[in-house]
Each structure stands twice: as C-alpha cells, then as structure tokens.
Image (cartoon, rainbow, N blue to C red):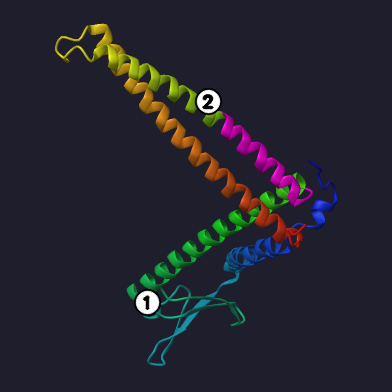
Amino acid sequence: MTGLRGSSLLRTPICALLALLLCAVPAAAAAQTRAEEAKERERVNKLRPQVRSYRCMTKEGHKYYGSTIPTQCHGELVEALSSQGLVLFRIDPPLTPEQKAAREAEAAKEAAAAAARREEERKAQVQVRRDMALLQTYADVSDIERVRKRALEDNRAAAQQVERTIDELKARQAKLAKQGAKYTTSDMPAQLLRDTRAVSYDLTLQEQLLARRKKEAEDINARYDEEKRKFLELTGKSGKK
C-alpha cells in the first residue's frame, strides 16, 4: 500500500473546509456581539462619575429631571447627562413580562442554534480528519480492494473455524443422542444428561457466533464500499481501470 505523502494535503476536500468556515462565521459574529456588549458596559462604567443628572420623557410627552433617576421615569428610557447637559449614555427601560418572556425565548433559540453550530463544526472537523486519513492511507482504489480482500479472507478463516467447531459439536451431539436413545430423561445417567445439555448449549453459542461472522462480512463490504466511494469523490477519479 502506498501513501500519498505531501500530495494528500492538496486533495483535502474543499467542501469540508468550507463547511468549517461557514460554521465558524455565526460563532464569530456571536463572539463579536458579546465583545461589543462588554465594551459598552465598560464605557458606561467609566462615564458614571461624570453623570450630574438624569432625564426622561414619558409617553405623555412630559420631561423629568433629577440628580437621581426620577420616580416618574420608571418604565421609560432614561438619559444620563453631564454637567454641560450632554448625553453620556442611555438606560433602557425595564422589560415588561411579555418582553422578558420574548427575550428569554430568543436567548433559548440562539443557544440552541449555537449548540447546533458547534455540533456541525465538530462533525465537519471529524470529517476533515477522516478524509485526510483516507487520502494518506490509500494511493489508489486498488489499495482499498486489497485491504478489503485481506479483511474478508481473515473473516472467512474465522468463520470456517467456527463451522469446523459446529461440525464437531453436531457429531458429538449425534453420538450422545445415540447413547441416550435407550433411556428416558428420568432414568438417563447424570453425566450423559449433563454432556447432552452442554453440547446443545455450546452448539447454540457457536451458531450465534457464525451468524455474527457472516454479518461481519457484510459490514466489511459496506465499509470498504463507502471508503471507495469517498476516495473517488475526494480524488475525482472514476474508479474505472
């Protein structure tokens, strides 16, 4: 089997790399939003010592001022003013129960979306690693077929060993059945009864093991079919000799 050395990196699937970038964009935007919010809080905290008064305008159009936030400003947008009357920053009104519920729902939605993006990014990263490993492992489709053949041969050898064991157990079972034919279950010698039950139990286990070996052969073919399909997709080869 021949590796691809440095050329494997050139064949890294661009679509998977693009998927990583697309997953990273929303995360970067969310991080930028959090950074901007933190920066705004820092700015407001620095300006607080300069505040000399507060001002608001009610829904009825009345303005109220005070060295502290006037009680009439409850539930309104409040402006913090400097000694020159300049607006230093604004204080948003508290949320209504409906607004709070809506914001919490939106936050939950954003958290779910962020979790989904992280999962997609994780999957994309795993796929990139798998694709690179595939390209570094195989130089051509013939490599995949050689590995498949070896895996199937190993599986078949293991299955044949189980089949031989089953044949031996069946022969043993037939011999015990012949010995026990002259007895009923109630008067069969204890050792013969134990041996008969033991052989039957072992035979069941071996038949189950043989079924697993056959299923493994199907899984091997499915695995290497997928590796072959992915290899051809990544390399752009037709797979035709």
Determine if residue 126 is in view: no
In the image, which is nearer the foreground, mark 1 or mark 2?
A: 2
Residue 215 drawn at (x, y percent): 49, 41
Query: Residue 105 falls in which quadrant of the image?
Result: bottom left
Horizontally, is 164 left or right of 133 in the view?
Answer: left
- The verdict on residue 134 being magenta is no
Residue 99 drawn at (x, y percent): 38, 75
Query: Residue 71 falls in which quadrant of the image?
Result: bottom left
Horizontally, is 63 left or right of 52 in the view?
Answer: left
Residue drawn at x 53%, y 25% is 161
Residue holding disc 1: 71
Residue 131 drawn at (x, y percent): 69, 52
> Label 1 vs label 2: CA separation?
89 Å
Residue 5 drawn at (x, y percent): 84, 46
Residue drawn at x 52%, y 39% is 216
**Three-letter amino acid code at disc 1?**
Thr
Q: Residue furthest bottom?
A: 61
Horizontally, is 36 left or right of 104 in the view?
Answer: right
For the N terminus, which image quadrant? top right
- The verdict on residue 152 being magenta is yes
Numbered range of the magenta stretch = 139-157
* SS for dot 1: helix
